[in-house]
Image (cartoon, rainbow, N blue to C red):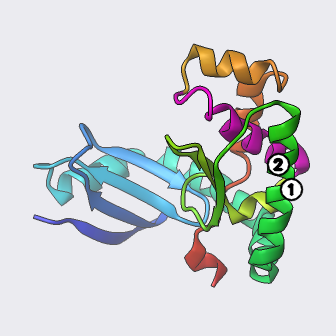
Amino acid sequence: MTLERTIHIDQIGPVRFERSKRAQRLNISLRPFAGIRVAVPPGVPLHTARKFVLSKQRWLARRTDQMRETEAQHQWMVDALRDLEPSSVKKELRQRLDDLSQRHMLPYNAMTLRHQKTRWGSCSSQNNISLNIQLVLLPDEFCDYVLTHELVHTEVKNHGTKFWEHLGKIIDHPKRVDSQLRQYPIIPREIIG
């Protein structure tokens, strides 16, 4: 049975319940501009998932308030995204990527620009780098971090120790920067309009 239902819960607001074959247990996630989602494992009925959410009502209310503040702070990103010209963004990001590639001797094959839902960038096994158009709105430090992160993936294809050591030779405290990057949510395309 497919389960995808949104239920309004007092003091929290809308909560989206989705059946997930990969979920081992009930899992709640909150994402700015995307709201609250509950991953429901196979065999768990909706009323059990709803009870679970109600047991977390205080925690969710606090987190929802924080999420709404984050959304308000990043509304400028939504407005800026509506005005972006994809061709000029692609040109700017390609130049930055090329500069970093040459400076750190990390060649890549091709670059594409997309409205990605959950990632700032990715690197394929053929060293093709895909970048999120929203990167151009990040502060330079974070934009360059993402570009460098993907370039390092041209040599190390995972996030193991070797990857972080290599990235750490280029960027000071890369795990700290990676953590700080999370303060900038990726805005879902449907919010942009």
Q: Is residue 69 visible?
A: no
Q: Are marks 2 and 1 in contact (CB under 8 Å)?
A: yes
Quadrant containing the N terminus in the rendered view:
bottom left
The residue identified by callout 1 is: 95
Q: Which residues are magenta?
A: 139-158
Q: Amino acid at mark 1?
A: Gln
The x and y percentages for residue 126 are 52, 44
The x and y percentages for residue 32 are 61, 60
User: Which SS class for mark 1?
Assistant: helix
Q: Which residue is at the front of the view, 160 or 44?
A: 160
Q: Which residue is at the front of the view, 3 or 165?
A: 165
The residue identified by callout 2 is: 98
Residue found 35% across the figure and 44% down from its top = 27
The answer for how far apart the CA atoms under marks 2 and 1 are is 5 Å
In the image, taking residue 165 as reference, residue 73 lies left or right, namely right
Mark number displayed over residue 171: none
Bin the neighbour count of mark 1 within 10 Å (Cα to Cα): few under 14, some 14-19, many 20 and up: few
